[in-house]
């Protein structure tokens, strides 16, 4: 592995750094975007039950806010349960925007890595070509084979490594975007259900 890094030259180091960041972000998002952590099953039913039992007090609301992103959205609805439907929906939407922003954390960085990795690989290719043509000294009859081989290895290794980083980064970026969109829809449906329950039972 170290021999490959040596053959690829110094342009491989920014790509290696980008690959480490990409793997770290993918693992972090996999852990943070688990369904059981974002939209736990049965949470809405529990909140509705607590509300019908007149147990929707401040302690429950604080517990919901610490529980999960869905809990934060439902807590915003319970906190404004005595307000009008419009005020309640506005509070839920405001909290929902903040929750969505938190769910999308680091996705911009992952998408940026997916976009620029091929360009960084192309930069390494250009550096390799410059070394190859730079080895052609004026008036020389033939190029140094070792220098030519080194330039070619820099060009090919960097191009390949840039593509190797970009493909999984783009796949996981799109996967996480779709996952978050699905969670947001589920949270919206749960919030609408909570609003209907609260206002129908007043």
Image (cartoon, rainbow, N blue to C red):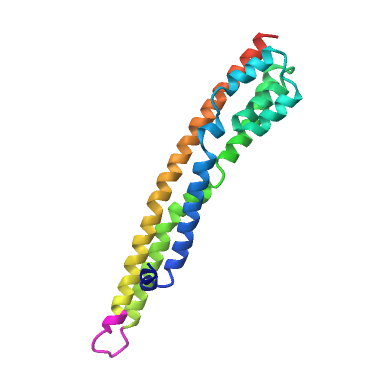
Q: Quadrant of residue 148?
A: bottom left
- Image coordinates of residue 109 in percent, x first then y, are 52, 51
- Magenta residues span 136-147
Residue at far bottom of view: 139
- How many marks overall? 0
Q: Residue at x 61, y 35 (%)?
A: 99
Residue at far left of view: 141
Residue at far top of view: 201
Q: From what the image shows, is residue 81 above or below residue 36?
A: above
Q: From what the image shows, is residue 83 above or below residue 150?
A: above
- Image coordinates of residue 77 in percent, x first then y, are 67, 23
The C terminus is located in which quarter? Answer: top right
Residue 187 located within the stretch drawn in magenta = no
Prevalent SS, magenta region: loop
Q: Residue at x 52, y 46 (%)?
A: 28
Q: Is residue 160 left or right of residue 109?
A: left
Q: Is residue 134 left or right of residue 175?
A: left
Q: Nearer the viewer, residue 93 or 50?
A: 50
- Image coordinates of residue 131 in percent, x first then y, are 36, 77
Q: Residue at x 75, y 21 (%)?
A: 57
Q: Residue at x 55, y 22 (%)?
A: 189
Q: Quadrant of residue 145?
A: bottom left
Q: Quadrant of residue 129?
A: bottom left
Q: Nearer the viewer, residue 67 or 122?
A: 67
Q: From what the image shows, is residue 40 above or below residue 170?
A: above
């Amino acid at each position: 592995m170290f021999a490959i890094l040596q053959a690829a030259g110094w342009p491989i180091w920014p790509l290696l750094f980008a690959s480490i960041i990409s793997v770290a972000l993918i693992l972090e998002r996999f852990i943070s975007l688990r369904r059981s952590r974002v939209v736990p099953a049965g949470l809405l039913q529990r909140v509705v039950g607590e509300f019908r039992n007149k147990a929707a007090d401040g302690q429950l609301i604080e517990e919901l806010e610490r529980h999960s992103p869905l809990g934060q959205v439902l807590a915003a609805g319970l906190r404004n349960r005595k307000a009008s439907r419009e005020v309640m929906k506005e509070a839920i939407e405001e909290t929902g925007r903040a929750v969505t922003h938190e769910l999308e954390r680091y996705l911009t960085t992952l998408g940026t890595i997916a976009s620029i990795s091929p360009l960084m690989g192309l930069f390494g290719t250009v550096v390799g070509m410059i070394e190859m043509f730079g080895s052609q000294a004026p008036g020389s009859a033939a190029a140094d084979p070792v220098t030519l081989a080194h330039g070619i290895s820099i060009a090919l290794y960097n191009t390949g490594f840039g593509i190797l980083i970009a493909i999984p980064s783009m796949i996981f970026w799109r996967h996480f975007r779709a996952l978050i969109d699905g969670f947001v829809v589920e949270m919206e449906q749960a919030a609408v259900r909570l609003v209907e329950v609260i206002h129908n039972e007043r």
